[in-house]
Image (cartoon, rainbow, N blue to C red):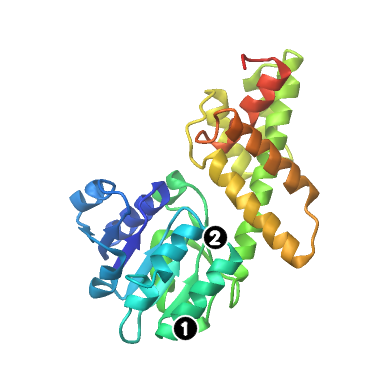
Amino acid sequence: MNVSVLGLGQMGSAIAERLIGAGHEVSVWNRSKGRADGLVALGATELDAPAEAWDRSEVCITMVADSRALADVALAPDGGLVHAASGKGRVLVDMSTVSVEVSRDVAAGAEAAGIGYLRAPVSGNPGVVRAGNLTVIASGEDAVFSSVEGLLRDIGPHVFHSGEGDAARVIKLALNLMVAGTAELLAECVALAEAHGVQRDRLLEVVGASAVASPLVKYKIGPLLADDYTSTFSSRLMRKDLDLALDAAAAGGVPLPVTGVVQQLLQACISTGLGERDFMSLLVRLQREAGQIPG
């Protein structure tokens, strides 16, 4: 299949790699130049502008940083994807984590342009993508989903069609508030144990074999043992996702008290220089407050 990937951050690049490896004809674009070089070396074609995607592809995948970036790429009057599409059979698949409101605006634009639109946010990080274990949560019309299901499974094997409309957006935000909350509890677990002289490796050995172990917890054990906070998903981006979850909660009249606290703790990470570190730097913030490491 001819497919374009727009947005070549860590996730977008990994997704493009998977598609190239699966034998698709892949075109790529990124706002800042240079990010496409490695993909071009693998066989991708670099685009000069988003609107060019439809000249080469039936399907366009967007994986951008936030709601504003999606609105710019999809809805800009001059060169936005929904305005540049021509003819039937085109499908826009957005895999970003963005607000329900912007997603609905894109849906309206896609409908007016006569192109299919699938919301397909993901759960996982670039390493998970490259290992072939990504989870894709999709929502949209059945026919649109069916037309790209095989393509999605080439990106990641765990593909769920969660209904029509923006159901996938809400599910992704719900998942990420659990991820952030789990990270904070894991950080508190480590800080408490180490305050009483428990060695981290001994603690995490028990945690990984206990009832509270999960794929997320197990995935974080290695980096925690190495004190490695290289970003797989930054504190800044996780805070952004919790902002979206809290906005959605307010629209639905649902209180999320724990999520609100974790959002503030992530903001504290950002305010103290940890914004681009992995969201597990919640532990670093806690250790600083406890005087376990220098501030």
Question: Circles 1 and 2: CB distance less than 8 Å?
Answer: no
Name the quadrant of the C terminus: top right
Q: Which mark is residue 89?
A: none
- Circle nearer the N terminus (1, 2): 2
Would you say 44 lies left or right of 256 here? left
Residue 20 percent location from the top left of the image: 27, 58
Q: Nearer the viewer, residue 124 or 273?
A: 273
Say what amino acid the circle numbered 2 marks. Answer: Val
Residue 209 drawn above or below residue 254: above
Residue 15 drawn above or below residue 4: above
Would you say 146 lies left or right of 287 here? left
Would you say 277 lies left or right of 249 here? left
SS for dot 1: helix
Residue 237 drawn above or below residue 248: above
Q: Which mark is residue 111?
A: 1
Residue 230 drawn above or below residue 169: above
Would you say 256 lies left or right of 149 here? right
Q: Nearer the viewer, residue 26 or 284?
A: 284
**Residue appearing at x 31%, y 86% in the figure:** 87
Q: Badge 1 local density, few (<14 within 10 Å), some, or many (20+)? A: few
According to the picture, the residue beneath numbered tag 2 turns out to be 98
**Residue appearing at x 41%, y 72% in the figure:** 92
Residue 229 percent location from the top left of the image: 52, 30
